[in-house]
């Protein structure tokens, strides 16, 4: 699947329910013309800000290096926009969209990712301090009343999920759900993040919630991190993790209008490794919250430094040889600096070819040198991506 098809797929509500681009735009109050104009505005803002900060080049490696140097020394909204736009670039800024529709598709994805990324960077320190303070909240509820309507709704919602379904036969589950509702509603700092608190208690303490009479959960415990075994599937745990995530997503939607969803998401993503598991193993649904680190990893793309006109056929022996040489990255970082200053990469291709003894590994010198160029460019792109992935840390 090529990049254009991936972007089209992103606009599908479901895999079997494709929404044409123009219909999608109409649903969001846009026309193709207005969306195209906003795409142009986004792009123009990016290059205007580059000029403002005297980054006067079209060399992508230079832009990455100079931008990284700027945000290391100073942090402001201009530089945050430049950083997140550069990190999430997929073709709008440096590519050549085939037509207006492709340009709009590039913009739709990039502008949304850039917005989410910027917002997460702004909120990181605020939410981090807020989460730390929650660990010291008073767990003395100031009310003995239970919202019975919410109790019934949460009870039935819980039974929709496999790991809680057995609660339908429990004599205690409904009563314990009521106690959970009572305690959360009576503590203001928890009431605003119900999706997280309810999901944490029901996921972590479901056996006690179902089987113990008069169980009253210790709500302070939900602010201690729980790490699940996410690297090995024992035939059951992955299905359980999926069910935990489905519960949180359902709670999130149910309490969308009355909760601080952004902070609830922050708690969910930072107090377990379920988000990490999800984005490694499931079809992505961007509504599942991510840590800022995971967001940087997912959103940051490899911006193409140079279009290679000739892609050589697979050369497994050369590939291994070149890769092994480039593992000594320190030696090749000088190349990136030189290329940023206008040096011709061909000299480095020749150097890599000789170091790998390319003449013995490939009869066709031109093919071996083209392969060296491909590997060196991929190496530089990987370095650029790593710089951009870590760039958000300068804003914290």
Image: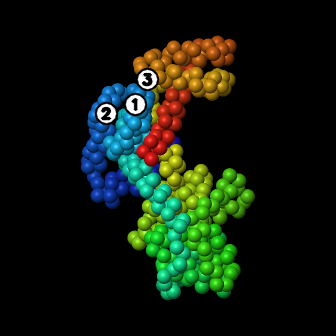
Q: Secondary structure at mark 1?
A: helix
Give how far across and how far down residue 90 sits, in percent. 42, 40
Give how far across and how far down residue 177 sits, in percent. 58, 80
Q: Residues within 10 Å of mark 2 (few under 14, many from 20)?
A: some
Give how far across and how far down residue 335 sits, in percent. 51, 21
Which of disc 2 and disc 3 is earlier in sequence? 2
Q: Residues within 10 Å of mark 3 (few under 14, many from 20)?
A: some
Q: Label 1 near label 2: C-beta < 8 Å?
A: yes
Q: Nearer the viewer, residue 243 or 118?
A: 118
| Residue 238 horizontal side relative to residue 98, left or right | right
The quadrant holding residue 78 is: top left
| Residue 8 horizontal side relative to residue 215, left or right | left
Foreground: disc 3 or disc 2: 2
Disc ID at residue 55: none
Where is mark 1, residue-wise? 66
88 lies above or below 210: above
Q: Secondary structure at mark 3?
A: helix
Q: CA distance from mark 1 to mark 3?
A: 10 Å
Residue at the location (43% across, 56% down)?
126
Q: CA distance from mark 2 to mark 1?
A: 9 Å
Disc ID at residue 340: 3
| Residue 184 horizontal side relative to residue 213, left or right | left
Q: Label 2 near label 3: C-beta < 8 Å?
A: no
Q: Is residue 355 visible?
A: yes
Q: How many marks?
A: 3
Q: Secondary structure at mark 2?
A: loop
């Amino acid at each position: 699947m090529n990049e254009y098809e991936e972007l089209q797929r992103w606009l599908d509500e479901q895999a079997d329910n494709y929404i044409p681009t123009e219909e999608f735009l109409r649903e969001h109050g846009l026309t193709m013309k207005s969306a195209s104009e906003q795409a142009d505005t986004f792009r123009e803002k990016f290059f205007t800000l580059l000029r403002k900060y005297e980054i006067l080049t079209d060399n992508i490696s230079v832009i990455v290096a100079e931008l990284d140097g700027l945000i290391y020394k100073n942090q402001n909204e201009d530089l945050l926009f430049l950083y997140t736009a550069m990190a999430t670039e997929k073709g709008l800024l440096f590519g050549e969209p085939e037509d207006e529709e492709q340009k709009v598709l590039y913009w739709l994805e990039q502008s949304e990712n850039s917005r989410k990324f910027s917002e997460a960077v702004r909120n990181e320190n605020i939410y981090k301090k807020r989460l730390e303070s929650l660990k010291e909240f008073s767990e003395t509820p100031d009310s003995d009343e239970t919202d019975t309507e919410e109790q019934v709704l949460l009870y039935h919602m819980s039974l929709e999920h496999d790991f809680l379904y057995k609660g339908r036969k429990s004599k205690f589950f409904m009563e314990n759900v009521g106690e959970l509702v009572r305690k959360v509603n009576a503590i203001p700092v928890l009431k605003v993040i119900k999706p997280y608190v309810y999901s944490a208690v029901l996921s972590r303490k479901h056996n006690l919630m179902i089987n113990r009479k008069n169980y009253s959960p210790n709500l302070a415990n939900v602010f201690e991190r729980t790490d699940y075994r996410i690297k090995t599937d024992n035939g059951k745990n992955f299905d359980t993790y999926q069910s935990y995530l489905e519960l949180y997503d359902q709670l999130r939607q149910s309490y969308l209008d009355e909760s601080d969803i952004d902070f609830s998401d922050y708690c969910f993503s930072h107090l377990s490794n379920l988000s990490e598991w999800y984005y490694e193993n499931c079809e992505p649904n961007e509504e599942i919250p991510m840590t800022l680190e995971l967001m940087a990893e997912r959103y940051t793309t490899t911006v193409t430094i140079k279009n290679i006109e000739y892609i050589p056929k697979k050369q497994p022996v050369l590939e291994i040889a070149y890769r092994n040489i480039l593992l000594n990255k320190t030696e090749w970082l000088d190349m990136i600096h030189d290329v940023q200053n206008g040096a011709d990469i061909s000299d480095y291709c020749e150097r890599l070819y000789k170091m790998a003894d390319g003449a013995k590994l490939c009869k066709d010198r031109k093919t071996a040198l083209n392969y060296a160029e491909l590997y060196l460019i991929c190496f530089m792109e990987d370095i650029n991506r790593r710089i951009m992935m870590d760039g958000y840390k300068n804003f914290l």
